[in-house]
Each structure stands twice: as structure tokens, then as C-alpha cells.
Amino acid sequence: MLAQPTILVVGNATTPASLDDLTAFAFDVADRLQFPARVAVGMDYVVTEYEAVVLADDWLDAVPSVVLGVEAQSADVPCLTADEVYAYPINDACGWCGETGNAVPALVGDTWTPSVHVACVPTLRRASTRPLAVAA
Ligand SMILES: [Zn+2]
């Protein structure tokens, strides 16, 4: 299993534009489900390592996302659709300090963190052993 429970976000990532859309959707996943949300690019992922798999609306449009989605379903990994994700409210409590208000996910490599305050991101960066690329 991964170091922390993470959700794999599966959808069409075969063009830069569709990857942008999928990355934006993964932001909503992290914002609403309060789990780290990794954007799946290609199909080199072990779906059973993930807490759940979220299937973007266009997941049937590309071979890698179809493979991952079908793998997840046949391995009994919990699968959520975009509609199910949007049924959750936006959660603006900070996943780091616990205070509410103005907390949003931060992109760390290919993974959105749960909502955090901008001010808490440097703390996260120090706490992590991986190189980080936090979106502005
Ligand atoms: Zn905070």
C-alpha cells in the first residue's frame, strides 16, 4: 500500500488539453473527498494500492483509462463517478492544521493534496521527503 491513502483519478489523459481537464477534475476530487488525488497518466498503476478510483466522465475515451477502470472494477476497488464526487460538499478545512476557511488542494508532483492553507504548504514541503512542485 502507499504511504498514505490516496485516490487514483482515471480519465482521458492522452492529450495536453485532456490532461489539463483531468488534473482540474482531480482538484475537485481532493477538495471534496479530502484524500490525496493522483492523476493517472498511462496505465502503469497498481489500482489495488489505492483507497478508491474516481472515473472521470471521459474515462471510456482512452485505452489506458479504460484498462485502469476495468482493472479497478474487477479488483473490487471502490469506484466513484464524477457525479458521486460532486455529491460531496467542498471541504475548506485545512488537512494540515485543521482550521477552516480558504484551504484548497495543492498540486504536489502528479497528486493534489487534500485542502490546505497556502501558509501551511511550506510546512508540508518540509514534512515531505519528495521533491515538490506546488501549483501557484
Ligand atoms: Zn492550515
Image (cartoon, grey):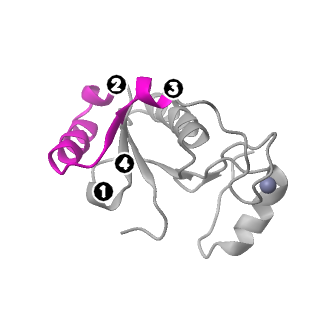
Q: Is residue 14 visible?
A: no
Q: Earlier in the sequence, mark 3 or mark 4?
A: 4
**Dot 3: within a 10 Å radius of its alpha carbon, few (fewer than 14), some, or many (20 or more) residues?**
few
Q: Which residue is mark 1?
A: 45
Q: Quadrant of ligand 1?
A: bottom right
In the structure shown, which secondary structural element does the residue marked by tag 2 occupy?
loop
Q: Relative to 135, is 49 above or below?
A: below
Q: Relative to 131, is 44 above or below?
A: above
In the structure shown, which secondary structural element does the residue marked by tag 4 occupy?
strand
Q: Which residue is mark 3?
A: 86
**Dot 1: within a 10 Å radius of its alpha carbon, few (fewer than 14), some, or many (20 or more) residues?**
few
Instruction: Using the image as rendered, state which of residue 127 and residue 132 is in the foreground.
Output: 127
Q: Earlier in the sequence, mark 1 or mark 3?
A: 1
Q: Give the side of residue 51 with respect to residue 43, left or right.
A: right
Where is residue 50 drawn, in percent x and y?
36, 56
Gap in angstroms between the C-alphas marked 2 and 3 = 16 Å
Q: Which residue is mark 2?
A: 58
Q: Amino acid at mark 3?
A: Tyr
Gap in angstroms between the C-alphas marked 4 and 1 = 13 Å
Q: Residue at x 37, y 24 (%)?
A: 57
